[in-house]
Amino acid sequence: MNDARAWLVAAGWMSVAASMLHLACIVGGPDWYRFLGAGEDMARGAERGALFPILITLAIAAILAIWAAYAFSAAGMIVRLPLIRTALVLISAILLIRATVLPLMPVGRSDLSAAFLCWSSAIVLVYGLTFAIGTWKAWPSLSLRGAL
């Protein structure tokens, strides 16, 4: 496996794990929402059986699954997806911005601890760097119609 492909495969599996973790919140219920830092409003909504937390969590899980598909596509594991370079740059940017900006901002949510913000941002930073490095290393081959 070449270097670019290894980074992209790792990014893809991180996305799969994150997607599955979000789905586990739905099954696990309010305690899972709280433990994973979704916030008290989401946890209370899950306690009430509200549809909103489920829909938001499903949407996030779906986005993360799409991100996995783009990483696996760029690694040549699945069919080439449209706008692959654009998608990988946007995914990398979203993750890196989230990792660097959120802990610096007063988010106005007392249910998110400083420790949660720091740990989650560190995890997302590694995740974003994995996407970014894989994208950078694969960039020349992504302009071709063939796989890595």
Image (cartoon, rainbow, N blue to C red):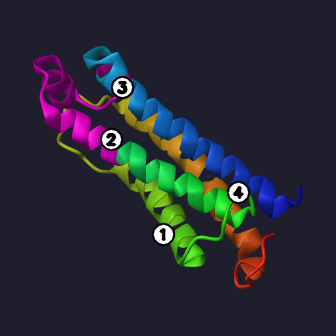
Q: Which of marks 4 and 1 is nearer the N terminus?
A: 4
Q: Which mark is residue 58?
A: 2
Label 3 element class: helix
**Residue furthest to the right:** 1
Q: Earlier in the sequence, mark 2 or mark 1?
A: 2
- Is 140 placed left or right of 89 in the picture? right
| Disc 3 from disc 1: Cα separation | 26 Å
| Disc 4 from disc 2: Cα separation | 24 Å
Q: Nearer the viewer, mark 4 or mark 2?
A: 2
Q: In this view, does 14 lie above or below 1?
A: above
Tag 4 near tag 1, CB within 8 Å: no
Identity, as a three-letter code, of the amino acid under mark 3? Cys
| Disc 3 from disc 4: Cα separation | 26 Å
Q: Earlier in the sequence, mark 3 or mark 2?
A: 3
Q: Name the residue under label 4.
A: 8
Q: Name the residue under label 3.
A: 25
- Is 95 placed left or right of 78 in the picture? left
Q: Give the range drawn in magenta.
A: 34-59
Q: Position of residue 114 (x, y in %)?
A: 35, 32
**Number of numbered tags placed on the structure image:** 4
Q: Which of marks 3 and 4 is nearer the N terminus?
A: 4
Q: Is residue 94 above or below residue 54?
A: below
Label 2 element class: helix
Q: Which of marks 4 and 2 is nearer the N terminus?
A: 4
Q: Where is residue 29 in the image (x, y as percent from the top left)?
A: 29, 18
- Is 1 placed left or right of 125 in the picture? right
Is residue 88 found inside the magenta-colored segment of the image?
A: no
| Disc 2 from disc 1: Cα separation | 21 Å
Identity, as a three-letter code, of the amino acid under mark 4? Leu
Label 4 element class: helix
